[in-house]
Image: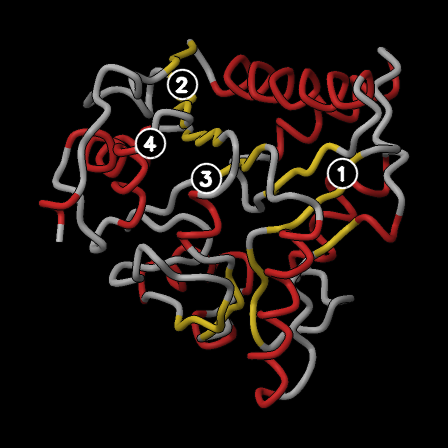
Amino acid sequence: MHNNYIKNTILNRPTTFTNGEQASTYTANKIAELIRQKQKEGKPAVLGLATGNTPKLVYKELIRLHREEDLSFHNVVSFNLDEYYPIGTDHHLSYTYFMAEQLFNHVDIKKQNVHVPHSDFSQDRIAQFCIEYEQKIACFGGLDIQLLGIGRNGHIGFNEPGSDFDSKTRLVNLHPLTREDAAPEFGELHDVPHQAISIGIHTIMQAKNILLLALGERKSEIMSKALHGEITNQVPASILQTMPHVEYVLDNEAARLI
């Protein structure tokens, strides 16, 4: 599979910072620059957003920029990468709830411009929902910037090992390691959903800019594989090696093995 892909090793050298706060502030400022530039052009800023612990400080800094430096989100249209299935949108561990608490409730984004893959409906409707989610992204001309974290198994979004590089938004089965990492939040492993709806790898790759943020020593081994290992769908993030418009933003701990 990897023989068809050409690495951009020079272009994809990571931007590293002493700690996670500095890396997150840098990432937030990159997003803020895009928002402000699009405002000058009178255009929407279409953001692909991520959840989990990694982007929390990014969102905290964006809130600060909104409150203290007049960063408006009135032109922002957001699409989240993923959501557990099944889970209610008002469940405190849903990503819908997470995004509201971590960002949307604290800025002036329009509610109709917020898109999270809501999954509180029957399985027979999921395929159509996924098609419509892709269509909504296309309607806005695609994602201007996609913020990514990375799982310890190399997943981006919930595109787990084995995901096709040409995949689009769909229902996925969560990898055991992904569920294990989520278990502390849910309390017990058996309470963690087995499935999720996720934007596909192809959809991510179509974003005009991609920022992959990785923080902490726990991410150092997978970042080494993602940046320098074989391009394989067993490490989904490895496909980003082929792309010139990806920036890896790491703290020193995450960059330890690079």
**What is the three-letter code of the residue carrying label 2?**
Asp
Determine whether 3 is above or below 174 in the image. above
Q: Residue 251 — which label? A: 2
Disc 3 to disc 4, C-alpha distance:
17 Å
Query: Residue visible at 25% across and 41% down?
Result: 238
Mark 3, residue position: 149
Of pointers 3 and 4, the one earlier in the residue sequence: 3
What amino acid does circle 3 point to? Gly
Amino acid on which disc 1 is placed: Leu
Where, by quadrant of the figure, is residue 36 drawn? top right
Mark 1 or 4, closer to the camera:
4
Query: Of discs 2 and 3, which sits in the foreground?
Result: 3
The local secondary structure at tag 1 comes to: loop
In the depicted structure, whether residue 122 falls above or below residue 181: below
Residue type highlighted by circle 4: Met
Find out whether the residues at labels 1 and 4 contact each other: C-beta distance under 8 Å.
no
- How many numbered marks are there? 4
Closest to the observer, 176 or 79 = 79
The quarter of the picture where the N terminus appears is bottom left
Q: CA distance from mark 2 to mark 4?
A: 21 Å
Res. 103 mark: 1
215 vs 51, left or right, is left
Q: Residues within 10 Å of mark 1 (few under 14, many from 20)?
A: some
